[in-house]
Amino acid sequence: MKIKRNNEIENYIKQKQEVSLYELKDKFNVSLNTIRRDVNELEKENVIHKVYGGVVYNSSDKTLAYEERNISYLKEKQTIGHYCSSMIEENDIVYIDSGTTTHYVLDQVDSNIHFTLITNSLEVMNKAVMFPNVTLLIVGNTYKRSTKSFTGLADNEIIDKFNVNKAFMSATAFSVENGASNSDLLENKMKSTICKRSNHIYLLIDSSKFGKTSLFTYCNAPDIHTIVTDENIDPNQLENVRNKGGNLIVVKNHN
């Protein structure tokens, strides 16, 4: 029975990539102490590693994991990003978050306009250098291969002084109850600080992210000004967000 449960837990974590201990407890209908013992055994086998409040699945190739996420829902992510391209205007101060959707925002921005761009995303940096009139500011001093992003607690002191017009944010998961969340504590602190310094927060997430919660909330749902997603969103999730007063834009895919 225990071996079967451990196998089921391993498969569940592999599917979710990151999950809280409380979610595992509820999912497998056992006590928190039992889940902790099961998790400890999986950690000894190098299947997972523990983070504050939960666990993350150990991938054998973190760079490949990013590429796999990038390919997943590719058309939807491109459509969401391209829709948001028109939101960047002359002399804006913009933050573009790391993620597999947000970097598409730059694909259709007028290359001649002047704006300031702040980012911790390697993908965004590579695209931004092609814009001759963009002032590019990079935050984070430690490179994380699994997300192609830079993090660093010291940079939070710098970020806390920024005045951002528009922040284009990513998330591992979103729910009305727990807002936008992710699984990395250092990235979470950076995201949270940026959101506090931004006049308008755009959350760019594909429809698969709704109704889920990751380990750490970085922005509560009422503080997100606009959510942009694709047309495959579950109607119940759409209704739930809008009933709570959320501004949600559904973008249709272009064939």
Image: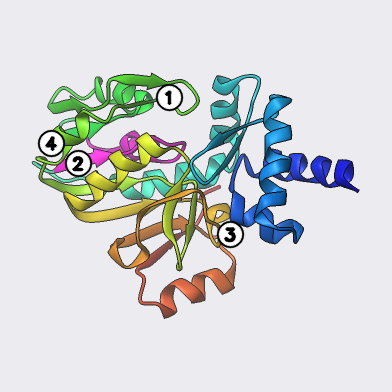
Inter-mark Cα distance, 2 to 1: 19 Å
Please tell me which of labels 2 and 1 falls first in the chain.
2
Q: Is residue 48 left or right of residue 132?
A: right
Residue on which disc 3 sits = 232
- Secondary element at tag 3: loop
Please tell me which of labels 2 and 4 falls first in the chain.
2
Q: Are marks 4 and 3 in contact (CB under 8 Å)?
A: no
Query: Compared with residue 167, is residue 99 higher up or lower down, i.e. above or below?
Result: above
Residue flagged by tag 3: what amino acid is it? Asn
Residue flagged by tag 1: what amino acid is it? Lys
- Secondary element at tag 4: strand
Query: Compared with residue 116, is residue 4 higher up or lower down, i.e. above or below?
Result: below
Label 2 vs label 1, nearer the camera: 1
Note whether residue 69 is visible. yes
Q: Magenta residues, as a range?
A: 93-110
- Secondary element at tag 1: loop
Residue on which disc 2 sits = 94
Inter-mark Cα distance, 1 to 4: 23 Å
- Secondary element at tag 2: strand
Label 1 vs label 3, nearer the camera: 1
Please tell me which of labels 4 and 3 falls first in the chain.
4
Residue flagged by tag 4: what amino acid is it? Phe
Inter-mark Cα distance, 2 to 4: 7 Å
Residue on which disc 1 sits = 148
Label 1 vs label 4, nearer the camera: 1
Instruction: Please identify the residue farthest to the bottom as the structure is shown.
Output: 243
Q: Where does the image place residue 247, in percent across and percent down from the top left? A: 34, 69
Tell me the crowding category of disc 2: few under 14, some 14 to 19, or many 20 or more residues within 10 angstroms, Cα based.
Answer: many
Residue flagged by tag 2: what amino acid is it? Val
Q: Are marks 2 and 4 in contact (CB under 8 Å)?
A: yes
